[in-house]
Image: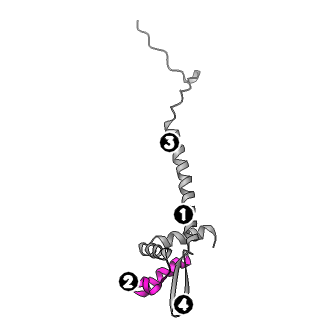
Amino acid sequence: MDGEDRADAWFHALSDRTRRDILRRVLAGEHSVSALAASYDMSFAAVQKHVAVLERAGLLTKRRQGREALVSGDVAAVRSVGAMLAELESLWRGRISRIDELIAEPDPEPDLSADQAPPPPEQKD
């Protein structure tokens, strides 16, 4: 998966409130999918699907222990997401700062060359 595909997978996975909550829980410690499912008002299958999306995005890992599937958060992957967001924030802060500088600059003096010189004042007789 290249960088852009990985970013798409991360944002898709993190776009759902339940998946973000699952990720918070498994970053704090390993949980079985059945224990996670007991925490939500949805079917076990629905929680499995959320876990699968997070796993495909590389944000968590799943391992089998007997009949249970145990899930752990991948701290390194979450740090990668954070680093990418920090890079984007830095880019946009730089652009916004430059816009602020341009707005704060005084208007340059108008160029009054011969062809743009103001008309002579009117003379009264």
Classify 10 Å Cα crowding around label 3: few (below 14), some (14-19), many (20 and above): few
Classify 10 Å Cα crowding around label 4: few (below 14), some (14-19), many (20 and above): few
Between the C-alphas of marks 2 and 3, the distance is: 48 Å
Residue 49 among those drawn in magenta:
yes
Q: In terms of depth relative to the viewer, which is nearer, 124 or 49? A: 49
Mark closer to the chain start, 2 or 3: 2
As drawn, the label of residue 42 is 2
Residue tagged 4: 65
Residue 38: x %, y % from top left: 39, 85
102 on left or right of 16: right
Between the C-alphas of marks 2 and 1, the distance is: 29 Å
Q: Are marks 2 and 3 in contact (CB under 8 Å)?
A: no
Residue tagged 1: 82
Residue with the most extreme right position: 2
Mark closer to the chain start, 1 or 4: 4
Between the C-alphas of marks 3 and 1, the distance is: 26 Å
Residue 23: x %, y % from top left: 48, 74
Classify 10 Å Cα crowding around label 1: few (below 14), some (14-19), many (20 and above): few
Residue 108: x %, y % from top left: 54, 30
Task: Tell me the magenta residue range.
Answer: 30-56
